[in-house]
Amino acid sequence: MPIRTLLSALSLLLLLETGCRVQETPEISVPSQTPGRAKNIILLIGDGMGLAQISAALYSNNNKLALEQFTTIGLHKPNSANDLITDSAAGATAFACGQKTYNGAIGINADSVPCYTILEEAEARGYATGLIATSTIVHATPASFIAHQPIRIFYEEIAADFLKTDIDLFIGGGKRYFDRREKDSRNLYAELQKKGYLVSDYSIEELSEVSLNGRRNFAFFTADKHPVPAEAGRDYLPYAVKMACSFLSKRSEQGFFLMAEGSQIDWGGHSNDGQLTIGETLDFDKAVAAALDFARKDGQTLVVVTADHESGGMALNPGSEMNAIQAKFTTNGHTGTMVPVFAYGPSSKLFGGIYDNTEIYFKMKQALGFLTETTSASP
Ligand code: MG
Ligand code: ZN
């Protein structure tokens, strides 16, 4: 026993000694100055956006996309825990939590245990956080970053989960799940206001007409349920990304985490509608341009663009010409092909190569320095 006591005393001394030495090394004691560390992350998800969707948009836009500006490109393997073909819930939960889960799961793992999302962690660490979608804001992709529900169609429960957080900004459709609920009589629109949020919606004003107050969290509903397609005049996504970057960068000295989704690219795949797919992908690409514009000026922002999966088994068939694509589809569901990942900014090099979709989570955490602090404690 006394030997063991002596040994632990010695190891404690060693630990203290090492600790002191570590503190003297400037690179380690000031982790925020580690070269390549990202202060902010903008994660842009084009739901259902595989290579064919990107190619069709490119060739329908005079052979030009903002996506071409990325220099680091990788591929991720999108399969879920229970199916080679993922859905958007498992796909987004993989990005949000770093765990493969079953199709339909929102922010919970394969054992039905809630997982701590990167957005929740960023919020807890004092970062400003935001979610933007062109579907309802309670739809699978945005929901998986903030809610914890066993089934993706629990829209009202997902809406209620938004109130359990202090997310700084969210913009998307789905007002009805907040203010005219069927399962309870809560009015989450009013509850958000009571919590101090500036809340507004499409029935009052356009998003571009809102004057933001930097000291209040912000929620904006772009539709009662799903917003209309870009083809029908929906154009808020690029502006919302621009607005969110400017707003969030002023909300915290620490940095921000923003996820913005081009939700309806997927729906073009489901309906085997090439024009819808192309219109949605081009709208999403404008949001990519807005994010790159901010990141280029800011210099401390990592932009990651990817998809949860490919939708429709889309192909550019023979007979396609520049600005006249013959799109064909193999399914009205999702497919299992690997999905491209584009990265720009500090730590962007981490995203080159081929890896599981869950790695996006760990790479983002590493870029923000969230991993280094835990790993530096162990050696
Ligand atoms: Mg989605
Ligand atoms: Zn889908």
Image (cartoon, rainbow, N blue to C red):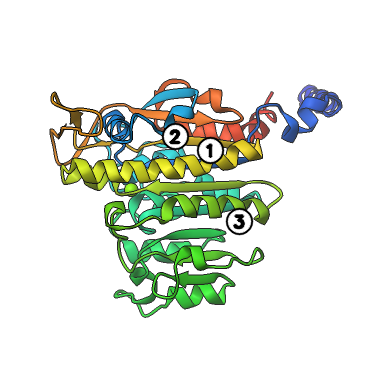
User: Camera-side residue: 114 or 332?
Assistant: 332
Please give left or right for residue 230 compared with residue 296 in the image: left
What residue is shown at x 25% (from left), y 29% (from top)?
A: 322
Q: Secondary structure at mark 1?
A: helix
Give the crowd class for mark 3: few <14, some 14-19, many >=20 residues within 10 Å. Answer: many
User: Camera-side residue: 155 or 70?
Assistant: 70
Task: Evaluate whether residue 17 shows in this view.
Answer: yes
Percent x, y of residue 249:
64, 50
Splitting the image into 4 quarters, where does residue 195 fall?
bottom right
Which kind of residue does numbered mark 3 sit on?
Phe
What residue is shown at x 27% (from left), y 41% (from top)?
A: 278
Residue that mark 3 sits on? 247
| Rendered view: 203 above or below 25 | below
Please give left or right for residue 360 compared with residue 46 in the image: right
Q: Secondary structure at mark 3?
A: helix
Residue that mark 1 sits on? 292
Which kind of residue does numbered mark 2 sit on?
Ala
Percent x, y of residue 180:
34, 77
Splitting the image into 4 quarters, where does residue 156 fall?
bottom left
Please give left or right for residue 254 compared with residue 342 in the image: right
